[in-house]
Image: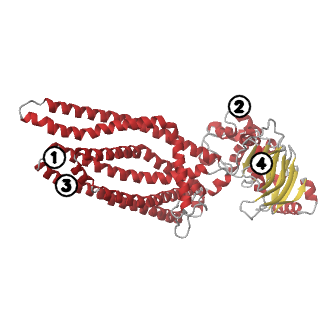
Amino acid sequence: MTTTGTPVREPQGWRGVAAENRDDLPENVSLLLRTRSRRLLGDLLRPHKKAIALLVAIILVSNAAGLAIPYLVKVGIDSGIPPMLRGQGSGSLLTVVAVILTAALVQAFTRQVFLKLSGKIGQGILLELRRRVFDHFQRLSLSFHERYTSGRVISRLTSDVEAIAELLQSGFDSIVTAVLTLVGTAVLLIVLDVHLGLVALIPLPVLLLFTRWFRRESSLVYRRTREAVALVIVHFVESMTGIRAVQAFRREPRNQEIFEELNENYRLANRQSMRLVALFMPGVKLIGNVTVAAVLLYGGWLAFQDEVTVGVLAAFLLYLRQFYEPMQEISQFYNTLQSAGAALEKLSGVLEEEPEVAEPAQPVPLPRVAGEVRFEGVEFSYVKEMPILPRLDLVVPAGQTVAVVGATGAGKTTLAKLIARFYDPTAGRVLLDGVNLRDLDEEALRRAVVMVTQENFLFSGTVADNIRFGRPGASMAEVVAAAEAIGAHEFISGLPEGYETEVGKRGGRMSAGQRQLVAFARAFLADPAVLILDEATSSLDVPSERLVQRALRTILADRTALIIAHRLSTVEIAERVLVMEAGRIVEDGPPALLVAGSGRYAGLHRAWLESLA
């Protein structure tokens, strides 16, 4: 689906059900998606087997009590009323009435138990589903999140889970009751009177064909509805997330146009589904009413011929009402089922997605990390046949501070991402203290290697909470010590509530320099052996940069550091400089030695000095 002027697309490919519109997928792929969703549903239901078996027993008792009432009405009319008319008392009728009341009480009680238990099971399933999805999204590799938009992620955890919730909360109850009522009623109609039963069931093939048509059409419509609502959520989330850029570039009118078109598509998809329901439900009711009229006419003639009793005819009419009402419930259930089925396919696809950076089956421990980083014949590309690093060999001794400079696209940030193992190399190995990163336990790697980026994310909460992010169990004294070490204590103490001050959305209540100092305090408290600074000062003004640079000298002491920077003022604190070009290291040496030469770094240094003049 696209909007005028601006296409709105999912990432290419069906893997992970990233593409919402699956109507055009090959049949084998559609079958795979359905198999995945059934497997996921089976996994979710498996822990509740015993409770579900109890539910089935309860609903059988409830339906048996409900189905008994029309038959008891028949007994009351045929066997309870005639003795009263003959003056033989009302004992028989009162007995039947008492049994009817007992059946009604049993039905009400079992119904209550059923709803409580089914609600408990449903909420347990939803709790597990949300837990799985959230946990899996966190474990998926960075490459997945770079192609799978935040709006899609939110759609999976909100509208898709809610669609399944609706199925579990009301759909399961409706379909079980409806199916048992249909089967039980059909059997009782034949038992009561074969001829009348056959007349009552003659419209059944027509009804089944009508239902089959509705099922096929609604399946397509509900997939389009899920696609449409996902696109609405995506656009809304991305517009609100990028609200600064939206307002800065006066993008509001265009965003509104896109939103209105997406919203209109969603409205049209819903309207089409409502049209199907508006055709199906009255159609079922019409078939039911015509059947009642035919049974009443034929049954009345049989009663006039004394071939059936009035009680049997009354029971038939009551049973017919029970028989056709569930058809409408089934149609409503099928609407819910289609919506939940489409949602379940997408969720199961995401849960089937394997992290591209996978944890090792037998991780190698790192009891003490020195911090030596080594690249051996490393090749890497984000897209096939477009190498970013053609072949790289590099050794960074433990405790050395290395600056990496070069033009945009030279491969500097890719180098950092490989050390942090956000990606694995296409070929070759990245080693930490002689151990391949692929063999390291992920938790150990995250403790050993920390990356501070240009725009560090501050989470909702206090300043102290954000500093503790890498070490949630750190005491307040340790938090304050980390802030003092990198020079952030003074400005934090000056905040309205000090360390307990709420940072606001993404740290919006702080300046860029203050946010970066909080990020450095977070990294200092985490105490990694290897620290990567990716353009950590490029967005700061000169006073803020000087403040941050003082913090850098503290945070880089006694640890391996990789500094990626465009500003050469940041590079001055490095012991070694790497100049990268087209994924290759073209210069390597101490800053003073490179400046004294005539290579690329010397040219960059001269240009920087001229810019300061």
The location of residue 600, given as percent across then percent down, is 87, 63
The residue identified by callout 2 is 477
Which residue is rendered at x = 19% and y = 33% of the image?
96
Residue 283 — which label? none
The residue identified by callout 4 is 532
In the figure, residue 393 lies in which quadrant? bottom right
The location of residue 405, given as percent across then percent down, is 82, 57
* View extreme (bottom): residue: 5
The residue identified by callout 3 is 293
Q: Label 2's element?
A: helix
Whole-angstrom CA distance, mark 2 to mark 3, is 83 Å
Disc 3 residue type (three-letter): Ala
Mark toward the start of the polypeptide (2 vs 3): 3
Q: Is residue 425 above or below residue 310?
A: below
User: Which callout, 1 or 3, points to the residue nearer the camera?
Assistant: 1
Q: Label 1's element?
A: loop
Callout 3 crowding tier (Cα within 10 Å): few <14, some 14–19, many ≥20: few
Callout 2 crowding tier (Cα within 10 Å): few <14, some 14–19, many ≥20: few
Give yes or no for contact between labels 1 and 2 (Cβ–Cβ under 8 Å): no
The residue identified by callout 1 is 308
Callout 4 crowding tier (Cα within 10 Å): few <14, some 14–19, many ≥20: many
Report the front residue among 517 and 283. 283
Q: Is residue 390 above or below residue 551?
A: below
Q: How is the image coloured?
A: secondary structure
Disc 4 residue type (three-letter): Ile
